Image: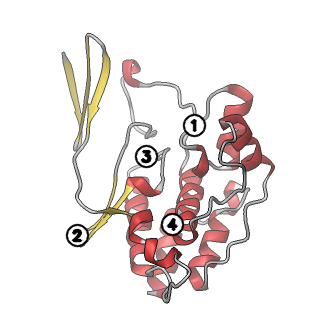
């Protein structure tokens, strides 16, 4: 068995293929944490500090030169100690041995950016980017706050149809109140260059907290 380490992630191969092991983090997913804000009787808006902690977790990864490639509510674990961004299996950025550098074929489609969905539809693969991560974070904040996917399509739609809906757009109107809603709307821009960076998202949220 071969074993390699990258910071706190271990990975290697064995007779049945490859494996990777990542730390376990206690806490709640962002979606579960914000459940009270999605009820008809909700009396408060999502906490900007919790949104900031999620954005900071993404920004910390981006500062190292890596894109996550699979940001979704279940991968943002919030606790009293902060927010952990988990599941780095699809991360892209640094040098990866060829044996472990698999083609990226998209992620959970509900959070894919239009450019990722378009590339997967056209070529079968895509390249994770920080701009696509920001879009995914916006979609994550939106569904966690509202319970709605950022783009409407039937629950039983195929992945291909889901991706077509994301490419063709537009996304649902962002009715999250205040600064958070304005940020989510900017993060969901179909044009990658028009989205704020993760660091800029952090800056806006810090100013508003």
* Disc with the residue nearer the chain's start (3 vs 1): 3
User: Which residue is under mark 1?
Assistant: 106
Residue 145 visible in the picture: yes
**Circle nearer the viewer, 4 or 1:** 4
Residue nearest the observer in this picture, 91 or 77: 77
Left or right of 8, for residue 68: right
The label on residue 66 is 3
The mark nearer the N terminus, 4 or 1, is 1
Display colour scheme: secondary structure
* Mark 2 or mark 1: whose residue is earlier in sequence: 2
In the image, taking residue 2 as reference, residue 195 lies left or right, namely: right
3D distance between C-alphas at marks 4 and 1: 21 Å
Which residue is pictured at 22% across the width and 49% down the height? 24
Label disc, if present, on residue 144 of the rendered structure: 4
Residue 10: quadrant of the picture: top left
Helix, strand or loop at label 3? It is loop
> What is the quadrant of the C terminus in the image?
bottom left
Q: Which of marks 2 and 3 is in front?
A: 2
Mark 4 Cα shell of 10 Å, populated few (<14), some (14-19), many (≥20): many
Residue 61 appearing in the image:
no
In the rendered image, the vertical position of residue 116 relative to residue 86, given as above or below: above
Q: What's the distance in space between the residues labelled 2 and 1, CA to CA? A: 31 Å
């Amino acid at each position: 068995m071969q074993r390699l380490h990258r910071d706190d992630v271990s990975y290697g191969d064995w007779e049945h293929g490859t494996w990777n092991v990542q730390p376990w983090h206690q806490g709640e997913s962002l979606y579960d944490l914000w459940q009270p804000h999605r009820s008809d009787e909700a009396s408060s808006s999502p906490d900007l500090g919790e949104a900031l902690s999620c954005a900071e977790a993404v920004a910390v990864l981006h500062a190292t030169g890596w894109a996550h490639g699979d940001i979704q509510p279940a991968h943002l674990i919030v606790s009293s100690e902060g927010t952990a961004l988990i599941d780095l299996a699809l991360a892209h950025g640094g040098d990866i041995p060829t044996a472990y550098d698999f083609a990226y074929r998209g992620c959970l489609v509900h959070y894919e950016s239009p450019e990722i969905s378009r590339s997967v539809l056209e070529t079968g693969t895509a390249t994770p980017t920080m701009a696509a991560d920001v879009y995914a974070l916006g979609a994550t904040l939106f569904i966690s706050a509202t319970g709605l996917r950022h783009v409407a399509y039937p629950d039983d739609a195929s992945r291909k149809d889901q991706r077509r809906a994301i490419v063709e757009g537009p996304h649902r109107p962002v009715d999250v109140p205040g600064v958070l809603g304005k940020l989510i709307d900017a993060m969901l821009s179909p044009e990658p260059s028009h989205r704020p960076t993760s660091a800029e998202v952090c800056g806006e949220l810090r100013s508003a907290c």
